[in-house]
Image (cartoon, rainbow, N blue to C red):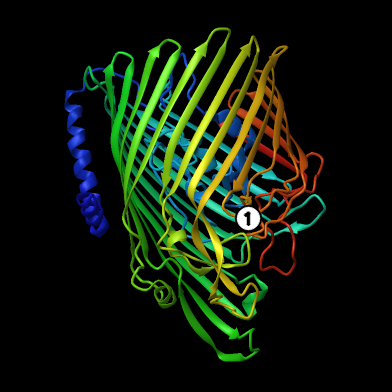
Amino acid sequence: MKWMENILKYFKEMETRTLIAIIIVIAALLATITLVASEPDTLMLEEIVIKSASTPTMSKTNISGRILKIENAHDGGSLFVNQIGFGIEKRGNYGMEPVLRGFKYSQLNVLIDGGVQTTNACPNRMDPAISQVAMEEIEKIEVIKGPYSVRFGQSFGGVINIVNRKPDRYGDKKIKGMIDAGYQTNGNNFYSNAFIQAIEKSFDLSLNAGYKNFGNYISGEGQKIASSFTRTGYAIKLGYNPAENQRIQLSWRQSKADDVLYAGLPMDADWDKSNIVSLDYAAGKLSHRINGLRLKLYGSFVDHRMSNTLRPAFKLTESVSHATANVIGGRSELIIQTARFNLLHAGLDFKQTGKDGTRERLVHKNICTGQNFDPPKAFTDQVWQDSKQSDLGLFVENNWQINQNLLWSTGIRSDFIGYAIGTPDDSFREYYGSKLTPANRIDLSATSSISWSLPREVSLSLAVARASRAPELSELFINHFNIGMDAYEYLGNPRLRSEVNYQTDIRAEKQWGRVVLFGDIFYSYIQDFISAAVDTTIARLYMPCQEPKFTKVFTNVDQVFLTGFEAGADLVFARNWLANIGISYTYAHNISWGEPLAEISPLTLLSSITYEHSRFMSKLNLRVAADQNRVSSHFNESATPGFALLDLYVSYRPFKPIECNLTIKNLTNANYVEHLSRAYKAMDIESLYYEPGISLHLGVRFTF
């Protein structure tokens, strides 16, 4: 294995510009295959899941554009509120994150357009990857529940692929577009968005731009919740089809969030700026055997600043943190028709993640001794310690349609991972000595699933997988920052091992005429689960006189497991009526510590009834969450009461180009809190983070 160690060392020591050059060379070599292209095909740059006409894909869910338009979510995380199996982690009204079956953060592989990846610059995750996407630009969202694909990086607990709007080449119009705007009463919120595309022969150009200004909202009992933010952004796509079976596309997205209040965190965001650029090439039917080629290069650049200006602690210590996060990567994939009913995906991907930044503190008063400083004392703290992670992945995934009713999918993946730390803090160096840089590693993942279509409209699916996840930079290098749900300072651990997930899903579906029933049971056994534990040998570094006195250090937990189910039914009745109901539950336990895992959503029921006509649509949505009393004592987690929530959505099209929307959220004005929401922190008052009370939303959309 010495040669593998040398390869890892080589990739770790390469400069970013060298890595980019290698990716470009690989892409150029693969692109030469397109010279033999001859047969036309319809190209889809963004879709990631192979679909079979006769058998279901294991644990795959699509969130359609129609649903996204109806619910008109204002934030990336809030898109998943009404999706079965999901919970939402909320620190503010901006930058929420989805939690799938208890898996979160880097345990979920969040992609943009089938491969672009970005990451948070804020150590408290004010700016998760999904917050960098404009809601109005999304065409649909693809979800794979579980680690059942190896094609798009390490997928530990699931894949979320955000598919943005593609050029519409149907019809004779060369210019198409849409303008929409709206107002929401609770918070005095305003939003607007404009989309336009132009098509001329083989070229197409599209532009999407949006603006949001949201204020502080009122809870069901009249409490004013700090939650305001302003967001602007735009996206440009330039496409060229050199042949009917080829497409080249350049995309650039830029967004900025200003003055974002985070009631669940000790600081607020002054700004969060992001730039994402990507270049795609796709070709179909290059030869009798080569069914397709996909190439992608991308870069993501996030600039984030947060401060405690509006917090009570500001008069004692002024704190400003400025951090950056960059991801540079690419992927190449060949789709090979190895037999008439067998499709093989083979390729490689690469990404390098780098994070850096400092926190500047001006201390006016030492709260431990009471001593005042005039002038105030200045301190500089390392946020990310100029840390980097590189990942070169090789994958093969095969889909064999054994017969009309039987599909077998298998895949294997190997990731070569290396790390670096550029400017370690003295306190971090003092604790870890010369072992500051984590060991290079090779992570292996494999999956296999089989799906049957049986008589009497019954389908069954079984999937198994072994998935690995390498530690992320915060788990390795964070240095005495309060980034958890509790009051502890957290310290990274360069000696962490990769997590390993052994997961199984069994899914069944039955159709009786207009009724469809489904159920999915999963079990996940995880070794070396990454958590954090109190180390009584390490004192609190900042404000040492305050509780808690000691530091939490990231560590590997030998054994944990998660198990649960999702079940539901869809019913089409009468004319134009649709009803559905779904229920989900996850039971998660830390075997080694003998307690529940923290931050697990409670039993949740989702139900809706929809009426849809050519010009009119209405939907009544019910969401019921049970009490969550299975909480972690190690993280001082609080139990939360259950709630029931009703939302009404109405859409009417008086004329073909105009659509009017009316939404009433929280019809009963319930005063409720999501279990995964962080409680108020570093504020004048102590409170749970309550959700908005009743709110009326009015919107209009003009299409041309």
Q: Residue at x 53, y 68 (%)?
A: 481
Residue 600 placed where, x, y %? 63, 46
Badge count:
1
Tell me where residue 433 appears, x and y as whole percent: 37, 74
Disc 1 target residue? 92
Q: Position of residue 307 (x, y in %)?
A: 56, 69
Quadrant of the rendered image containing residue 605: top right
Asked if residue 641 can be seen in this view, the reply is yes
Residue positioned 64% across, 77% down in the render:
546
Tell me the element at label 1: loop
677 is higher (above) or lower (below) than 261 = above
| Residue that appears at 40% across and 68% down | 385
Closer-to-camera residue (45/254)? 45
Is 332 displayed left or right of 692 in the figure? left
Query: In this image, 37 relative to 199: left or right?
Result: left
Q: Residues within 10 Å of mark 1 (few under 14, many from 20)?
A: many
Q: Closest to the observer: 162 or 513?
A: 513
Q: Amino acid at mark 1?
A: Gly
Answer yes or no: is residue 145 visible.
Answer: no
Instruction: Estimate the x, y position of residue 371 in percent, counting from the top left.
Output: 62, 91
Q: Residue furthest top?
A: 455
Q: Residue at x 47, y 16 (%)?
A: 55
Name the side, left or right, on which 515 lies relative to 286. Answer: right
Q: Is residue 478 above or below residue 540?
A: above
The residue lying toward the viewer, choosing from 266 and 375, is 266
Residue 301 sits above or below residue 458 on the image? below
